[in-house]
Amino acid sequence: MTKALSLYELNSLVADVIDTTMARSYWVEAELSEARENRGHCYMELIEKNQGSNVPVARASAKCWSNVWSVIMPYFMRVTGQQIHAGMKVMLQVHAQFHPQYGFSWIVDDINPEFTMGDMIRKRQEIIRQLKAEGVFELQKELCLPMFCQRIAVISSETAAGYGDFSNQLETNEYGLWFHVELFSAVMQGDRVEQSIIEALNMINSREDEFDCVVIIRGGGATADLSGFDTLALAENVANFPLPIITGIGHERDESVLDMVSFLCVKTPTAAAAYLIDQLATTLMRVENAQTAIIEGVRRKLEVEQMRIRHIGTHIPVLFSVVRTKQEARLVGLSQRLVGRMTERLSQSHFHLNTLRQRMLPAVQRHLSDESHKLDMLEQRA
């Protein structure tokens, strides 16, 4: 009867074969379908997809023990500005390990951040190319920040120190300017960044008339894991947004796609607050300068008019004398004309009366003669 091997013996045999034939390390390119840390160790699920159909053609598990992970991960984050996450493409140096109890896995010895950085740049360039093809890449730059930009919609985590710094700086600005800040809470780190920010933008868009601009800020936490800001859907939402969007994500690496399509990109939340304060202070200065110019213009106009009145006042006595002389001469002329007209009128009336008297006298005499004759006749009869 053939003697069977125990499972442990078989697995030990496989382990010996792997240790013998695959003793060296290999560099492998793969995409992370899962990555999680536990007690300092990192556990990864690697996947390779068919470029045409995007269907997985290979899968494998990989582990990185804490003594190695604590060394390679900080360097990876410094170079890429991100933590590893699902969907990221990585180049790992691995060696094969088959444990009789736990089975086969790839053990990670090193990671190449430049490869991941290059893949991130390629993805970013593809997103930028698509945004430009859609004609939306520069849309935000065409907007204008209102002169009195005081109503600010903020997208940030409610507990983020950056949001507190932003609000405090606006509230305690040296000019005493007033700002109204309303927070639209969102997840600013991890896999839900894209969806959470888009939801906040939709809420602000429904109340567009209540705000002058939008500020997306992130600060006070880890500066890594910024992949959520390099997505096409989020970039399209920001690029097409009707209000100017200012980003202050708080990182020193290359700009994210979100930064590129926004109205203005600053490095930190406090820099965003400083920009808004400076803009409103500039408006205040323009208003004060206009006020000063108006006051000065009115003052100069009053001075000119006062000089004109004084000039006119000095000529009033002379002008009055000339006018009085003219009026007196006019009155004398009118008086003379009146006297002449009255004399003429009286002469005409006197002539008319004489004419009437001369006409009436014969008639009266005849009438008296007739009456006298009648009296004589009556006296004879009597």
Image (cartoon, helix red, strand yellow):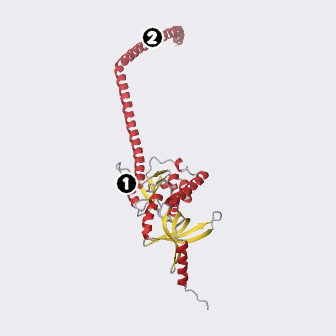
Q: Secondary structure at mark 2?
A: helix
Name the amino acid type tagged 1.
Gln
Q: Position of residue 184 (x, y in %)?
A: 46, 61
In this figure, which residue is indicated by the disc labeled 2?
340
Query: Is 55 left or right of 347, judged from the image as shown?
Result: right
Q: Amino acid at mark 2?
A: Gly
The reply to whether callout 2 and callout 1 are in contact (CB within 8 Å) is: no
Spatial CA span between label 2 and label 1: 96 Å
Vertical placement of residue 146 versus 157, above or below: above
Please tell me whether mark 1 sits on a helix, a strand or a loop: helix
Which residue was labeled with disc 1? Answer: 169
The residue positioned 54% from the left and 80% from the top of the image is 13
Residue 89 in the image: above or below residue 363 = below
Q: Of marks 2 and 1, which one's residue comes earlier in the chain?
A: 1
Residue that extends furthest to the bottom in the rendered view of this protein: 1
Residue 340 in the image, given as x and y percentages of width and height: 45, 10
